[in-house]
Image (cartoon, rainbow, N blue to C red):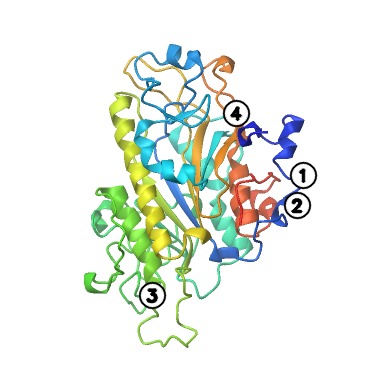
Amino acid sequence: MERRSFLSMGAAAGAALWLPRSFGAQVGAPGVSRGSGYRNLLILVELKGGNDGLNTVIPFADPTYYALRKNIGIKRELAIQLDERTALHPSLQPLMPLWRSQQLAIVQGLGYAQPNLSHFRSTEIWDTASRADQYLRDGWLTRAFAHMPVPTGFAADGVVIGSPEMGPLAHGVRAFMLTNPAQWSEATWPAMPTTPILQTRNPALTNHRDNAGSVGKGIAKAPNRVRPAQRQAQLKTVFPNGAFGNAIKTAMQLLALQDVPREGASNNTAQSQPTGGQGVAVIRLTLHGFDTHQNQQVRQTALLRQLAEGLTSMKSALVELGRWDSTLVMTYAEFGRRARENDNKGTDHGTVAPHFVMGGRVRGGLYGTPPTLARLDGHGNLPLGVDFRQLYATVLGPWWGLDASAILKQRFEPLPLLRV
């Protein structure tokens, strides 16, 4: 049986061959570490605006795809074939070494029941891991860190780079909003009136202050507060130009600097940062621009190239830092796009979409439910394949060893994405 035959929880009996019967079985399964906890790093990559999944992971063998997308469909001869019916957008060519080494997983059909096609509300649902009819205050990562706190020796719970929104770290008390020194300035960040953000005193991340500073109604931020250039970590990895590439570079330098003890502390003191780049549990990056209502071919081609080149450089840097095997990288977005192209050679807000998971301990391949274009709903949208909270349960359970059901307020089967 192929990995792609896995269906969402409660589907055909064949799915049980790939999904464990219980959360505990997956955590204790061979090849899954329970004890590493937050020493396993999570990097989230938000595809802001809702990426078009059908032109990203392409069902090229289905003639309905080309019937629905006469202008913007990716020509079969240009697509990068993965198997007999699935291909990648040509801009994703840089990811193929990861695919061939089975360190890249693609989960198709991710979404949730009763989808909301508002950017704001659907983003909120993904950030809080709520149902469509449920309103939760805290981000799903904030709840995770409340359930099991990050070790006090860590610089922070998490760092947000490239977005003025805390997202899944909303209402956390040990989270950074760190701007990219090459591309961003303090003026780019609007006031955030409700989210408490700690500005720690780790000189690897911020200027030393006697007390946490505040910007905009009690919000503490750390724009351009990295070490001076002469003290920044020097990495051999070459990062892409542009805001996303610079955000990745900043994130990797942040990880490298976690090996540097605090000023005035020896390597033998309790004030030293944990070694191996383990000073934060999660980093969140954002690639903007995926709301492609018009001229999608040009816009998405450029965006997916940025994504692929950025993820490739990230992998190179993580290997250089010795962190590839202890890092899980995961993309997400508020929704996908409609199956049929619109009159402006673009796509409108849709439902499910595929997402990428990569890392040294990822069991690569196709997972989830392939797009069934013959089963579009009355609005022309794809049916739900896999609840996105199963992906979160994979992070919380097998990756971090936490009680995913308590944090997500419901039981979701983890996806079998991890290996030794």
Judging by the rendered image, the residue that carries numbered circle 2 is 25
Question: As shown in the figure, which amino acid type bears the numbered disc 3?
Answer: Arg
Secondary structure state at the residue bearing disc 4: loop
Judging by the rendered image, the residue that carries numbered circle 3 is 201
Quadrant position of the N terminus in the picture: top right
Residue 147 coordinates in the image, percent (x, y): 63, 61
Quadrant position of the C terminus in the picture: bottom right
Secondary structure state at the residue bearing disc 3: loop
Judging depth in this view, the residue of 135 and 200 nearest the camera is 200
The answer to whether residue 319 is left or right of residue 132 is left
The CA span between labels 3 and 4 is 44 Å
The CA span between labels 1 and 3 is 45 Å
Q: Is residue 105 above or below residue 4?
A: below
Between marks 3 and 2 in the image, the one whose residue lies nearer the viewer: 2
Between marks 3 and 4 in the image, the one whose residue lies nearer the viewer: 4
Between marks 4 and 1 in the image, the one whose residue lies nearer the viewer: 1
The tag on residue 340 is none
Which residue is rendered at x = 38% and y = 54% of the image?
A: 314
Residue 291 coordinates in the image, percent (x, y): 37, 32
In terms of sequence position, does the residue under pointer 3 or pointer 4 come before the other? 3
Judging depth in this view, the residue of 98 and 398 nearest the camera is 98
